[in-house]
Amino acid sequence: MLPTAEQIPTSMSSQEATVTALHDRDQARRLSRLATEALLAEVELSPKPGLVDPTSCASHDDMDVETFRASIDAISPWFPVLHETGRAGHRDGPARFLERLRRPGMGCEDAMFAATRGVNTHKGAVFAFGLLLGCAGRLAAGGLPVTVHTLTALAGRMARPLVEVELPSVDRPGTYGEVAFVQHRLAGARGEAASGYASVRLRALPAYRAVLEDLGDQRAALLQALLVLLATTDDTTLVKDGSLDGLRHVQRSAQELLGTGGVRAPDALTRLCRLDADLTARRLSPGGCADLLAVTHFIAHLPSGDD
C-alpha cells in the first residue's frame, strides 16, 4: 500500500533535508536519463510497422528519424523539472497533482514543437513520462523507492480523474483520443495511465523480459514487446474518421505474427517488413504503441518491487 499524504514525514533536520535533496536530484538525473534512453531506443528500433525508424518514414511525410532525435534533445531537459514538480506536490490530491504537472508538461510540448517546427513527434510520450517522472518525484518526497510496482500504482491513482472526470466531460472531441472515447468508449493514453500502464506491466514487459532472457538480444526483445502491444492495445491513434477498421487490422496482423512465433520465427524480420509496408500503404501509424514501447523500455530498467 502507498502511504497517504498525511503519512509522509514533514519534519527533519537541516542536514537530513540537504542529504535528501541531493539524493532526489541524483534520482531525477538518473530517471531522466533512463527516459531519454527509452525514447532513443524506440525511435532507433527497426523495422517498426507503420512507425518512423532510421530506415523508413513509414506513412509520414512531415517527419523522419532526425525530427525525432531533435525532439528528444528538446524535451529531455524538462524531465528533471517534471520530477521536481512531482516532488513539490507530494501532498496534492490527484486532480491538483495533475494540474501542477500541466504547466511543465506544456513547456515540454512547446519545446518539442519549436524543435520540430510544429510537428507532433512526442506529445503522447510527454504525457506518459511527465506523469511517470512526476510520480517518481512524489515517491522520493515520501522516502519511498521507485520500482515498477510503486511507480505504476501511483501513476494509476493520480491519473484516475482523467478517465473518471475529464474524458466524460468532453463535448466536442478535438483529438483522436477524444473521438475514440466519445464514439467507442476507448480511453486511449489516459486509460493506459489510469490502469497503471497495465498493457506494459502485464503484457509487453513480460514479453520483453522473456525474449531478452532466451535470446540475449534487446532489439528482438523490443520488437516482441511492440508486437504484443500492437496485438492487444486499443491504440486510439489508429481510430481515424471515427472508424475502428485500422485499429482492428493492426491488431489482427500483429496477432498473426505472434501466432507464428513472433521474433522467434526464422522469417520474423521479413514478416515485420511486410507488415511495415502494409501499414505504410494504409497510412496507419500506431503512435500510441510506440509511446508504450518507450515506457516498457523505461520500467524494464527499474527494480520490480514485487517482493
Image: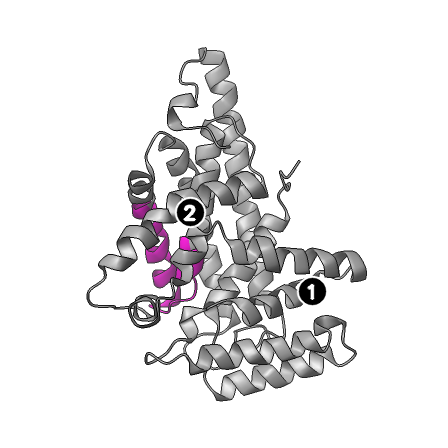
> Which mark lies nearer to you, 1 or 2?
2
- Dot 1 corresponds to which residue? 219
Residue range highlighted in magenta: 102-127
Tell me if residue 9 comes above or below residue 307 in the rendering.
above
**SS of the residue under disc 2:** helix
Residue 116 magenta-highlighted: yes
- Residue 298 falls left or right of residue 4: right
| Residue at the image position 53 percent from the left and 38 percent from the top | 150
Label 2 near label 1: C-beta < 8 Å?
A: no
Q: In which quarter of the image is residue 257?
A: bottom right
Residue furthest left in the image: 171
- Residue 283 falls left or right of residue 260: left
- Dot 2 corresponds to which residue? 131
Kindly identify the amino acid type of the residue bearing the numbered disc 2: Leu
Residue 64 image point, x, y percent = 49, 74
| Residue at the image position 44 percent from the left and 52 percent from the top | 193
